[in-house]
């Protein structure tokens, strides 16, 4: 059965814990597909077929070296439990609803890999922050926004049950990478056609917590955390 391995929590990221606590080498050893960010909230990390890429706030896409560090990532060895194709055109909200019904997965973590032709895709990428780190809701005020048209590529991400918002992002949290490796980012919305969807239901969840002085000394019991996640993501 599929297992997701998560490095730190969205709650910690929202709280401004952007220190690089986990080497990329260790992250990709735990899964061949995933998403996250790099040290200092430097861009949007996407891992496809074992290769890690980051989309920086300038729009630059580059492959990530194994010795770079991440404060937060979620990965899995992606083995689909449900695959289907769709004709027609769909936006993110429509496809999200179809996927949760197809996999009957509202109460489970699951990975989602979506390929197709995008008429339009709206994305962003976080700008690298400097210490002392701000909270995420303030950091994302500085980010690059991208509107891509007529591009082919892959979305990958995870569905987190809404009742455990804070461990991850409730609902679907997906990143994009174009097939030509020139475009990508954290995705807000899209319109896609010629859709192939692969879903991987997960019954096992492993969390690895940061072992940094900053993490140990930060009070993450913030009553505004859930609202900040909604505002940031």
Image: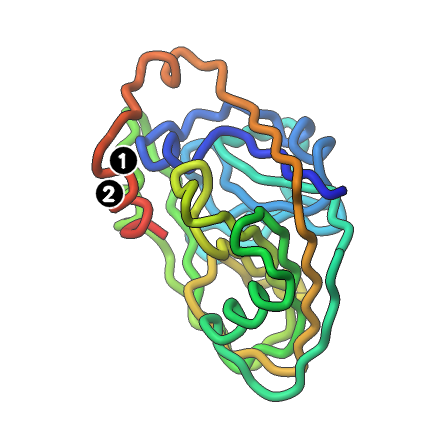
Q: Give x and y (percent) for residue 137.
A: 26, 44
Instruction: Please tell me how crowded label 1 is: few (under 14), some (14-19), or many (20+) other residues with Cα within 10 Å.
Output: some
> What is the C-alpha distance between the residues marked 1 and 2?
6 Å
The N terminus, quarter of image = top right
- Quarter where residue 61 is shown: bottom right
Name the residue at 53% across, 42% down: 36
Q: What SS does tag 2 mark?
A: helix
Name the residue at 49% across, 26% down: 20
Q: What SS does tag 1 mark?
A: loop
Name the residue at 56% across, 28% down: 207
Nearer to us in this view, 141 or 85: 85
Nearer to us in this view, 123 or 6: 6
- Quarter where residue 129 is shown: top left
Q: Which residue corresponds to mark 2? A: 138
Q: Give x and y (percent) for residue 59.
A: 48, 58
Q: Which residue corresponds to mark 1? A: 135
Nearer to us in this view, 220 or 16: 220
Q: Is residue 107 above or below residue 181?
A: above
Q: Report if residue 177 is visible in the image.
A: no
Q: Report if residue 132 is visible in the image.
A: yes
Q: Give x and y (percent) for residue 70.
A: 53, 31
Q: Give x and y (percent) for residue 163.
A: 41, 45
Tag 1 and tag 2, C-beta contact below 8 Å: yes
Q: Is residue 26 above or below residue 225?
A: above
Instruction: Please tell me how crowded label 2 is: few (under 14), some (14-19), or many (20+) other residues with Cα within 10 Å.
Output: some
């Amino acid at each position: 059965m599929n297992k997701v391995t998560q490095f730190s929590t969205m709650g910690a990221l929202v709280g401004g814990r952007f220190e690089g606590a986990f080497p990329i080498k260790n992250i990709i050893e735990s899964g061949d597909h995933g998403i996250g960010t790099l040290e200092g909230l430097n861009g949007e990390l996407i891992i496809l077929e074992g290769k890690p890429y980051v989309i920086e706030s300038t729009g630059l896409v580059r492959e990530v070296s194994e010795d770079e560090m991440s404060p937060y990532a979620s990965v899995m060895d992606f083995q689909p439990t449900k695959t289907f194709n769709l004709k027609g055109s769909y936006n993110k909200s429509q496809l999200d609803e179809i996927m949760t019904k197809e996999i009957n997965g509202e109460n489970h973590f699951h990975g989602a890999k979506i390929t197709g032709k995008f008429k339009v895709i709206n994305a962003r990428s976080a700008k690298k922050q400097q210490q002392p780190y701000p909270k995420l809701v303030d950091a994302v005020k500085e980010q690059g926004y991208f509107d891509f048209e007529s591009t082919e590529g892959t979305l990958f991400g995870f569905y987190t049950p809404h009742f455990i918002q804070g461990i991850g992002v409730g609902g679907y949290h997906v990143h994009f990478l174009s097939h030509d490796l020139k475009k990508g980012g954290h995705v807000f919305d899209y319109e896609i056609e010629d859709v192939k969807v692969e879903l991987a239901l997960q019954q096992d969840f492993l969390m690895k917590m940061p072992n940094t002085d900053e993490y140990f000394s930060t009070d993450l019991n913030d009553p505004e955390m859930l609202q900040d996640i909604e505002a940031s993501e």
